[in-house]
């Protein structure tokens, strides 16, 4: 059997070719996550065409790094879904379609007020996929006692997402206090040698607490996906 | 014979001095590619002056990284060529002059919808120079089965151009399936540690598949030129 | 209540001060992972003194990035444990103490033969902590069909660890085929613009498959810890 | 048809599992290049085990970035092939097996005497794969007249490989003189801000001559592979 | 006593939760510096909400990296404080609340006219916290004699802040002339390889004069805080 | 004698303190170059105040990296000099005051049309200081024969300034043809891995032709100063 | 008065020219710190010649980054001082001459056992200059309760030096608990993206606690000098 | 006339092909500097073969970055020249052949004792080419008064070479005091963020004194060449 034959056998996996995009309707089955539209660097007419194709298949939709203009175009498009369409201004997320039944708890902590957009991205994503998710803002390492009220949320969670910019120290400090899986998300908050989030990223990759999962800079979406995957498994 | 004498002998190679530019009308003969105008960092009046000089010599013209304003100025300029002048909005290419007879096939694959501008630059360039060229969009590694329909294009091509941003993995995966020459073009699509395309570039330079030709970031034009050079030779 | 008082209340958490080190015997309770000795940059006499202190408390021991000389010193030290002490030459791990009952399965895949040391570090760590763990070597993207026999291991695993150097493409390709949590570990295998693993690291952080957990370069140990934490939870 | 089924169909592509490596005996058919052993970062006993497996299948063998010790172990191994085994000291290449009938010409030019190891890697690789290949050393841009005698070689070649360290200017200068495809290889020759070859690499990626194919630093092997692929096609 | 208990004891440290922020009213007692609002990356409505909470507690307020729009919102907010609110246009600082009695002297020197915004940030911060502070502008190393009139200020100061962009040489030169503690602040003034202040930062970290304290790029605020801490202590 | 005394003796070197700037009227005597105003990062009112102070002393004035708005303010200011004030739009230079008698010749060559702004900065600066200066544009390495007509200018010059972006190869090629001092200026022309001129800078620092003087990116002004210093000396 | 005259007046500041070095015997008076010998990159015979010159002047001596061989040469040299010469093996410091009367307290905290060499450098330096200094090792953020016993040392200190590698989080955490001046020293402890200490350095420069003084990587010596300068002042 | 013809005319420029090298005997005439052998990255037998070819033509020889072993091989080779062969141990230079008549003065200043090897490279090179050259060591910015005795040398020189590592501030300070051309050479002396000389390099490129010529890191040889070119011209 040749490679061509082997590739041929892959032909039966369904997708839909709309010229500039090939939409993978079975991704939910295969990867556990539906195809998500990354809006940055895409033209609005391309985004809406993809969304339209998905809506026809009755898929629920998640769009990341979107602007208000994208939201307006999407709203016009989805008559049926219009009620369900929602735009999260701080994080630039758009969700279309009803919400799922939620189980388990993902706790999202962030170091400062400026980190909220990324934390919101994680919370909304995990929630969209079917996890309960709660945010705890402004618990940076310069005032650790602010972390205390978070106690109950903290201890009920199955997985923690920790969002921080600048020196990115929060995951290490929280990692010293818990045995739960931690997902660290560096943000581009800061200036000078914060290098738009690189310093926080590298600090997190070098944490003295072993086993912290690290995401790309400002990637709250990825953190939400991973948190959901870990959380979901726990209830099987 | 002194260096001065040697340089003197180069004097007979024709070019045209228009003050701020020296236009090399014989470049086609010498390098197989006509002089191309790189519009970025140039003033519109300089671009149109260069184009005007070339038009007088009845040269076909290719302008890269151009804006709509450049296109408008060029259109006004070339009465005779006006019908033939064309602006490719996604890639910012402008072509002036009739198309050549085309032979051979260059297949241009790109990983995502956001990579299309760079892929278009490669397709139009190769086509302008005299190759047949086809684009296959949105065949990224997260859904390899989408690559399948590309089968026929793929197997008829003499050379493949593979365009990808983010982690830049597509050339390696395709390289495992074919013995055709592959030209990889990293794009600036992505955010955070994609470093505006550097990560894709370095991934491509480090491919575990040996012998992949790599281009500068977003340099679809260069890929089109090289693809044409390889393709053209194959038919001699 | 002042900060001093608050800190005072932390005083009752036990640790043991041996001058140049403060050994945290309750870390297992608090973080789910015993204190681990990172041998690089430490003098052998310091490592053995720490190990000796832990042995007195009957702790099981894990030492990372160790050399054969460290192993020899440790062997001399632990009469009682000698039988159980083991040195993993490729990865430089040392384990001391009997093995735990193991549940769940962590599958560790690596792209090339040169990546085995890091993969071994992940396998031995997860295993030491109480997970079943299996390695599948040399399944790089240039010959994807080699991945097939891995099928059974693959589908029984609760979490996947994917180890790769050079262009770091393997996690993306595997991520397109499964809904299991994936932990990606870049290795320093390569030369030139592999930048001792940075290129693979950045490629993994930019994967087009969302939700991949990324570790520091060559950090198989961290991957083993995280894989165990995720795996362990699945069985509660 | 599920992904598992699709993967299953790939099962029939042959490879041989020797524990720490999976040897891809059909790579020659699929990619046009046999599996090549990259010796750096591999243990000698692993290299020889892989070579032994290939020898049993009567494969010709190419080992890159090898040392004299590797060569000695390989020599002991291959009684039958011993006469054919050869070690290229400057480049660290080992070839085992008789040479192929050669067609076409690959010309390899290098800027300085210090660049010869990388140039040799390209020449021997192209030659091993079935191309004629010739080297022209020490033709750097500070004395362009030295390039002249190269005239005949130059004009008979189907493709040029240009090897240079330091400022990496040679490909641009040669690119201004010819319409043949050019493959540029940066070398780590230099000091200070040559950054072990990065400066030459970036200079080549930014050449004002369009369509130059660029390789990783010191990757003469990759250049040889690509040169052969382009050369081979020209004669069909 | 568990970690949870220990954390519990921290609960009595007062802070105020306003949803997106947790305001630490006792920071003055604990760290000697009141909570400061970093305006960059924050929404104006968040900044004013935080300020409002602090005003209710009669805290004096310092806001850094603010714009005129922030100042306008703050002015509207603080009826009582309005007279005391002040906006420093060059540095983007806002102070609210009466000034403290000042002791000791902090001398702030800057290399060029373009460095004044950062120097002003240091002067106003130190002054707000209770130090006397004076600025001496345009005393760069290309005309050292301009430093002379600064003599009296210079010799009365308890600590020096030295602000410079470009090559960042001024702290080294001043360090050769005095035994007072020096705080060096690199600025983003320059172009090309000034790398937005990185070159000045690294030059200062490598000063041949030992013991110079270095701040992040453009961090006049941090310099003002440290200068005040050192100055304040000197009078006890 | 103490350092204070020594510094005291420097007091007699004249400068003028205008609050935010200390103007060094004797710099011409000491350094051979009058004080020059670097407009980038300065406020227009500061620039005009400095210029006004210099005009009162009848100094000729050179302002670099200026905008049209700066020019307008300067024009309003200098009634007497108005006729002599001139704005060079491409390079952003402003000169005020009559021109000097010129001796010697500085030849400024640039690789492409996009490099002209930087070349103009060098030409105008050298000319302002008292050198004859001529520009030769668009003589890049892809068409070396265009360099030929430059022959006469070239051989009469006392020093050459070579301006290039992208791969920065031109100084090396010219360096192979002449024994005159060469000053190389990298420009930020290019994209992707041109890194805003860093690649050209590093290429020039690594030239295989020894003794090339290198300037900061886009620093045509510095090149003009150095060229004048070398040229001027030649006639004594 | 000309610059030459001004420079002339500096002539009376004493130094001693020994050919390859000019020893500045009055540095103690001028900068408060005697001239210190930085041994790295110097030949042993040069180091001993400098030391010999200083010994003749009865200066106390501090040598940094020295090896055992340097210590042996120094020991042979200084008969009179031999008893007082001491080599600190972990940090590579050599001190020669009796100890001063010490006042005030500098507390040096370090995150891990591997950071001790740098911490020792700070302790010995501050002590040599006349401060009391104590070290507290292994108090990293993964087990904050270990910090508690440090309470008394901590609260008596006039200034804190905090030494940490990897993610460099310790200064931020300690900064949240105290109002004392903090000097942060990044170390090269770590691997992969610790970048030999750069990550810790940038984390410290970006601390969310304002006013932390940062030193070059592994520069315990500089920290000791600054700590002493701040400490000394406090007692006047 | 074709390019081939043009290249043909260059054929008459003499060079000698010895297989792995093409020696350019007329470089002295063309570039004013004889061909120089860069020993780093070259095999000893290649170096001696090149030297032998040059000796036969009675060329004087300069070898840079050489070791003692290279010197020994060269000594054996050149019977006739043996007396004249000299090895400069600190800088690794080898000169062969009698010295020229010297005119003009090149003053080489270096900041610290550790910078002497690079300064020596500049002095010996300029001297070999026919300039008088003197070294002034250890005149760093932390003790500017040490510069004073240098007065006479300083004022007689036609050009200054300033060598410094670490923060690279010396060229700026000297540039404020003189109108002579300055050539700055950064050295790799330092540690941590000195980045093996990059910090000094960038500081020099950003000097606030305009028109300083900058060389590659540790490139004393290049500085010597440029200094000689500038010096030589002054006497015509």
Image (spheres, coloured by chain):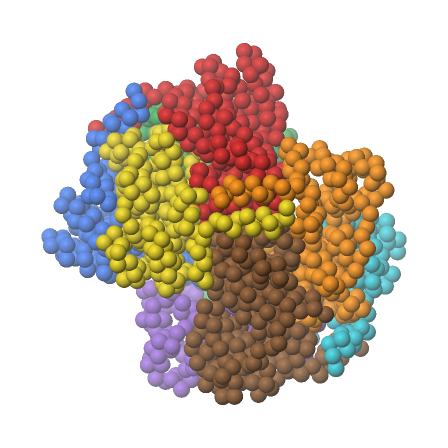
Chain colours: A green, B cyan, C blue, D purple, E red, F orange, G yellow, H brown
Q: Is residue B158 left or right of residue F154?
A: left
Q: Please tell me whether residue D136 is drawn above or below residue A59 in the rendered image.
A: below
Res. H198 visible in picture = no
Expressed as whole percent of the image width and height from the top left, the position of residue H196 reads: 47, 57
Res. G50 visible in picture = yes
Expressed as whole percent of the image width and height from the top left, the position of residue E196 reads: 57, 44
- Name the residue rendered at 41%, 23% in the picture: E28
- Name the residue rendered at 56%, 81% in the picture: H98
Q: Please tell me whether residue D115 is drawn above or below residue B217 in the rendered image.
A: below
Q: Is residue D4 left or right of residue F133?
A: left
Q: Nearer the viewer, residue H212 or H24?
A: H212
Expressed as whole percent of the image width and height from the top left, the position of residue E194 reads: 58, 48
Which residue sits furthest right? B79
Q: Is residue B89 left or right of residue F101?
A: left
- Name the residue rendered at 33%, 77% in the picture: D73
Q: Nearer the viewer, residue H37 or H149?
A: H149
């Amino acid at each position: 059997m040749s490679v061509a034959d082997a590739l041929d056998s892959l032909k039966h996996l369904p997708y839909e070719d709309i010229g500039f995009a090939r939409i993978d309707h079975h991704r939910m089955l295969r990867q556990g996550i539906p195809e998500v539209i990354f809006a940055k660097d895409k033209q609005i007419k391309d985004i809406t065409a993809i969304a339209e194709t998905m809506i026809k298949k009755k898929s629920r939709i998640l769009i990341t790094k979107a602007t208000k203009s994208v939201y307006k175009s999407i709203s016009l498009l989805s008559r049926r879904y219009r009620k369900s369409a929602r735009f999260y201004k701080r994080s630039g997320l758009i969700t279309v379609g009803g919400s799922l039944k939620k189980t388990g708890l993902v706790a999202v902590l962030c170091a400062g007020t400026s980190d909220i957009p990324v934390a919101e991205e994680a919370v909304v994503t995990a929630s969209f996929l079917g996890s309960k998710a709660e945010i705890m803002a402004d618990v940076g390492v310069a005032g650790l006692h602010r972390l205390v009220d978070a106690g109950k949320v903290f201890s009920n969670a199955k997985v923690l997402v920790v969002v921080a910019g600048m020196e990115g120290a929060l995951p290490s400090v929280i990692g010293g206090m818990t045995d739960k899986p931690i997902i660290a998300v560096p943000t581009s908050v800061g200036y000078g040698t914060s290098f738009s989030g690189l310093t926080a990223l590298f600090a997190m990759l070098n944490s003295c607490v072993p086993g912290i999962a690290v995401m790309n800079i400002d990637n709250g979406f990825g953190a939400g996906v991973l948190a959901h995957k870990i959380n979901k498994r726990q209830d099987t």
